[in-house]
Amino acid sequence: MNQTIQRFGHPDTLVAEYEHWVVLLRPEQPTLGSLVLAAKSDATAFAALDPAAFAELATVVWHIESTLERAVGYARINYLMLMMVDPNVHFHVLPRYDGARGYGGVEVPDAGWPKAPALGQAVALTPAQIDELATWLKGLWPDVTATR
């Protein structure tokens, strides 16, 4: 796994793995269910990804959105490709909602709603909370071979 994936806590934060992508629980939650969608390649530019990674992305995004809809009932979803500190291709996936959502004793308000996400007001998860939330999302995740 590349350094960006490792930086976001792999394997402890792993929710789902595909041929070209991993989905990780974001250790700092600006909204409940925030994820990192990371390419497994060493590419540092979106255009440098293998065409097969782009093809697989449609299925991964469908799995993300269907899972987060069931988990938190988001109103909108944001995919942020920031890549300023962590160089490998990845997106921060933030389900957006009015108010707060909670699970397993973790409550996370969407402090930026309805404007840009408030990344600086994220809830930092403990290792036990990471394990609980990752397990919860894994339980809601479709079979990784499922397509629309």
Image (spheres, rainbow, N blue to C red):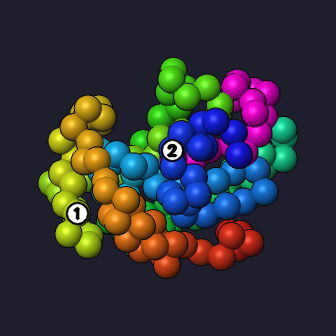
Residue topped by disc 1: 106
Q: Residue at x 57, y 52 (%)?
A: 10
Q: Is residue 127 above or below residue 70?
A: above
In the orientation shown, which residue stands out farthest toward the right?
Answer: 51
Instruction: Name the one closer to the observer, 27 or 59.
Output: 27
Disc 2 to disc 1: CB gap under 8 Å: no
Label 2 sits on what residue type? Phe
Image coordinates of residue 114 in percent, x first then y, are 22, 40
Q: Which mark is residue 97?
A: none
On the question of residue 109 being in view, the answer is: yes
| Left or right: residue 139 compared with residue 76 | right
In the orientation shown, which residue stands out farthest toward the top?
Answer: 84
Mark 2 Cα shell of 10 Å, populated few (<14), some (14-19), many (≥20): many
Instruction: Name the one closer to the observer, 126 or 119.
Output: 126
| Magenta stretch, residue numbers | 36-49
Quadrant hosting residue 103: bottom left
Task: Identify the element where label 1 is drawn.
Answer: strand
Residue topped by disc 2: 8
